[in-house]
Amino acid sequence: MISLVVAHDEQRAIGYKGWMPWNLPEDLKCFKQITLHQKIVMGRVTFSSLKKPLADRFTYVVTKKKDYKVPYDNVCVVEDFIALLEEYKKKEEILFVCGGALIYEQALPYVDEMWISLVDGKHSADTYFPAYNKEEFNIESKQKKDGFTLLHYVRK
Ligand SMILES: NC(=O)c1ccc[n+]([C@@H]2O[C@H](COP(=O)([O-])OP(=O)(O)OC[C@H]3O[C@@H](n4cnc5c(N)ncnc54)[C@H](OP(=O)(O)O)[C@@H]3O)[C@@H](O)[C@H]2O)c1
């Protein structure tokens, strides 16, 4: 099963100068709750922006760089992202797709559910979540939080 977790604003902005365009501690808390003890996947650019791998999660880092090495036991480097998506699509175990933009774009056709933090307002940004068709999803839950609304979409 493929799940996607993202925080985007009203214009689908997700990133600015290599980080998120906002400071929303409660969103980070939600992200942690959703992904803790799970398998997650992220692009090499997003992974490189972290000081170290996210604790208590197993991370797949996607890159085309043949010589890319990561010195952590809980991180696995993968070259073929589509093969990884196809593998987890068939499994009951969930793979959480955690960005950034290039990764979200390729994962979107595969996702079974999405956890979207819809951030209030519009922000300066240089990276955007791809356009998606909300009609393909049911809203399972909607929770207003401080600065954003947490939406759980499940594919119809
Ligand atoms: N708001 C949010 O929820 C959220 C979440 C995550 C990230 N972000 C933001 O998004 C931005 C980064 O996004 P980004 O799009 O620039 O980068 P990214 O998606 O994190 O990483 C892109 C890299 O992933 C690798 N890659 C992508 N597709 C691949 C494939 N099919 N096979 C093999 N490797 C592949 C390539 O690495 P190589 O170049 O090494 O080959 C590519 O350069 C940052 O600003 C970050 O803060 C926001």
Image (tube, helix red, strand yellow):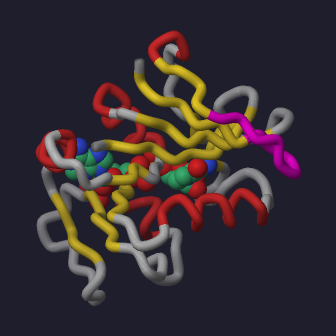
- Which of the two residues, 25 or 20, is positioned nearer the viewer here? 25
Instruction: Answer left or right for 151 relative to 62.
Output: right
Instruction: Answer left or right for 134 relative to 82.
Output: right
| Residue 120 found in image quarter | top right
Give the percent coordinates (x, y) of residue 47: 43, 67
Q: Does 67 lie within the magenta span?
A: no
Main secondary-structure element of the magenta-colored stretch: strand
Identify whether 118 is placed above or below 66: above
- Which of the two residues, 21 or 145, is positioned nearer the viewer here? 145
For the point 52% across and 82% down, the residue is 51
> Magenta residues, as a range?
141-149
| Residue 65 found in image quarter | bottom left
Of the 4 image quadrants, the one containing the C terminus is: top left
Give the percent coordinates (x, y) of residue 125: 70, 41
Of the 4 image quadrants, the one containing the N terminus is: top left
Instruction: Answer left or right for 129 relative to 91.
Output: right
For the point 38% across and 57% down, the residue is 42
Give the percent coordinates (x, y) of residue 145: 83, 48
Identify whether 138 is placed above or below 56: above
- Which of the two residues, 44 or 27, is positioned nearer the viewer here? 27
For the point 48% across and 63% down, the residue is 35
Identify whether 93 is placed above or below 155: below
| Residue 43 found in image quarter | bottom left
For the point 14% across and 50% down, the residue is 80
Give the percent coordinates (x, y) of residue 112: 36, 33
